[in-house]
Every structure is written in C-alpha cells, then in structure tokens.
Amino acid sequence: MVYSVFVVPSMLGKAGFDTSSVFIAVCLTSAFGSLLMGLWANLPIAVGCAISLTAFTAFDLVLGQGLSPAVALGAIFLMGLIFTAISITGVRTWILRNLPAGIAHGTGVGIGLFLLLIAASEVGLVARNPGPGLPVSLGALNAMPALLSILGLAAIFGLERRRVPGGILIVILALSGIGLAVDPAVRFHGLFAMPSLGAGGSSLIGALDVGGALNALVLPSVLALVMTAVFDATGTIRAVAAQAGQLDEQGHIINGGRALTADSVSSIASSVLGGAPAAAYIESAAGTAAGGKTGLTATIVGLGFLALVFLSPLAALVPPYATAPALMYVGLLMLGGVRKLSMDDSVDALAGMLCAVFIVLTCNIVTGIMLGFTTLVIGRVFAGEIRKLNLGTVAIAAALAAFYLGGWAI
C-alpha cells in the first residue's frame, strides 16, 4: 500500500492541493490509522488514504462540483464524524443489513470505472471528442505516456499474478526511472528532506472549512462518501480478519467495534492533516498471508509510514504515467464487485448496474447512487415486491430524487 504516497498526492495535486503537504498527510494518516488499528484493536489491518475516495474528493468534489480544497476537507471531516458515530452506536450494522446490496456493490464498480476513466484520460489513452458523436475517442496511443501506462499495467498484472511483494510500487518506481532518463519534465530533486507542510501558506493542516461543507448542496456528497466507506471498509476489515483467524465462533470480528472505530476516526484525522478519506487496505491480506496475525503487523506498517515523511522529494519525481497503471489496476479490481450482484434478485442487481454505469457516464458518484435508489424503489413497486423495501431505502430515494428534480444538484 506504500504506492498510495505517490498516487494520492498525484490525484489531489490535480485538484489544487499542495502535493508536498498531501505527501506528508498521507504518511501521517497511514501511520495514525495503522498504529491505532494495531495498538488499540490488535488486528493486522493497515489503514491509509483510500484510492477510490481520493478520486471522489479530487475529481468529483473539487474539479467536478467546484468546491475548494478547504471545503472538500470539511466534507471529509463531516464524513468521518458521521462514520464514527454510526460505528460507535451500531447504526453501521443496521445500514449493512437494510440498505440494498446491489447499490452498495454497484457503487464500488462505478468508482472502479471512474478510476479507469481518470487514469486513461490523464495519460492520453482516451481524449475528449471535439466532433459529433460520443463524448470520448481514442487518444494518442503511440505517445510515450500512453505506451508506458499500458506497459506498466501489463507488468502489474504479471507481478501481482506471481505475487511479487510490492509489485505496484516496483512498476511506479521503474516508470519514474524511465521518465527521469528520457522525459525532460521529470527532474530529480533529492531523496531526503525534512517534512514540509507547505511553503508560502500552502499548508493543509487545519485548513478544512467545515462551515462551507455544512451546505445543503454538499451534504449529499458527504452521505455518498459515508455510504461508500461503510460497505467498502467493512468488507475489507472482515476479509482480512477472517484470513488472520480473528473471527469468533459466531463469525464476528474479534475487537470488531474497535476496528470499525479506528477505521472511521482515521478519516477525521486525515481531514485535519489535509489528506483524503481513510480506509482499511485490502493489501493487508498480504501481511496476514505471510504470517501476521496480530496488531504488531499494523504497528510496523504505521512506523514505516512515519519514516517515509523524510522522503517527500520522491513525490515530485513520479510522473502521471507512472501512477496511472496503479490507478487502472485498482479500478479493474473494483470491477470484481460485479460478481456480487445476484440476478436471482434482478431488480436489485440491475439497479446496482445502473448506478455503476451512470457514475462513470456522468462523472458524478451521487448521481449514480440517486438513479440506483430511485429505479430500485420504482422497480420493486412494479414487480410487486414492495415488502422487500424498507423505510430507509424509500426515504433516501425520495430525498435524492427531490434534490435532483428541484435543481439543487451541483
């Protein structure tokens, strides 16, 4: 998961965040979350800035909706507060049991497609179509950024298949080395440096604007962040805990309450530090496969990220075509959520697919979620399956539909 220290600053940098400050924020957030998970919850689960939610923050909240970085950080803070509250009170369990699984999995698939589009567009694999027809077309496939990105993605396929430790990071560093050798835009600025929190007033620590995020136009995006994090993080924590043998006789996560709280509190810390929403990393499974069964594993990861704060000059060395393969790979992995959509309940599955498709077609996660919820409710009515609906699902569908039909959507 160390590749996140390059990928997250690259994405947030495009949205106007100071990349050096984000690098430090990613390191400190990962250190805080992993140490909390290891020392308090005693689980071998590393926590860091989530790639999918980073894309949401950069390309949806800031570049898509026009929010300032400060307001976006305020939205992450509110998301963390809500996430922590529902984790402590048990509402998180209720949500997992009662909200439609199709839309939950469809949201993950849609974000995966969104990541693919972001990365492919960034390196010129696809381009805006200036003429009539579909909005995108094939980009400059023979240009160096596109060629290196495809090469890097294929290399990640092979390395991950062979289970080479740090395969994604190896590709990022290798492509950065090629860029340093042949690309004049890539320059070496040193290896070590004292932590810089942003020069010239660009520090992101404490720069969040919570008041600006407490806006009726922004709150739906906050709730979308919460819903995405609830399903994604919970599934990850359970999967890694199961592999580590940390489930009790009833199949519940040992210290599960502490694990879920550590996960959610990390997003609050990240917003204050100037980073992206935090989540448990599925890459933790590599540690458990190697024998890590306790919180010592996560603690070592946290200490490692603390040491990384002195390597911030490396962030400026990594070009977009070095991080694009990692983004595309993560996006492709997220498409695996399709297999969790069961056509035995076709209304739920198709609403989830619609949610996924419109997240990428509109480049707006809330829009996809809105269409998923509304078509699910209407579909249940026409299918004569009203009893499968619950008040929470209907309320969310009605609120989102009113939000869009009233013209308040950003």
Image: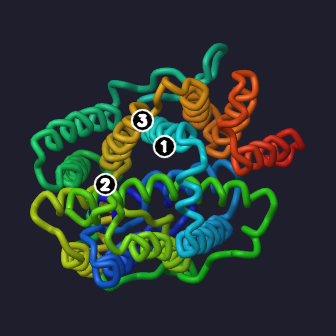
Q: Amino acid at mark 1?
A: Gly
Mark 3 to mark 2 CA distance (whole Å)? 14 Å
Q: Which residue occupies the foreground of this view, 281 or 245?
A: 245
Residue beneath the point at 60% across and 35% down = 355
Residue 7 left/right relative to 398? left
Q: Amino acid at mark 3?
A: Lys
Is there a contact, CB below 8 Å, between mark 3 and mark 2? no
The quarter of the image holding the N terminus is bottom left
Mark 2 or 1: in front is: 2
Q: Which residue is mark 2?
A: 239
Instruction: Work out whether 339 lies above or below 254.
Output: above
- Residue 100, position in %: x, y? 59, 42
Q: Which residue is mark 3?
A: 340
Mark 3 or 1: in front is: 3
- Residue 307, position in %: x, y? 24, 80
User: Which sits earlier in the primary sequence, circle 3 or circle 2?
Assistant: 2
Q: Which residue occupies the foreground of this view, 170 or 341?
A: 341
Residue 19 left/right relative to 42? right
- Residue 27, position in %: x, y? 35, 74
Residue beneath the point at 76% across and 69% down = 214
Q: Amino acid at mark 2?
A: Ala
User: Which sits earlier in the primary sequence, circle 2 or circle 1?
Assistant: 1
Mark 2 to mark 1 CA distance (whole Å)? 16 Å
Residue beneath the point at 25% across and 51% down = 172
Q: Which mark is residue 264?
A: none
Bin the neighbour count of mark 3 within 10 Å (Cα to Cα): few under 14, some 14-19, many 20 and up: few
Residue 137 left/right relative to 408? left
Q: Which residue is mark 1?
A: 108
The answer to whether any part of residue 192 appears in the image is: no
Q: Which residue occupies the foreground of this view, 184 or 160?
A: 160
Identify the element where label 3 is drawn: helix
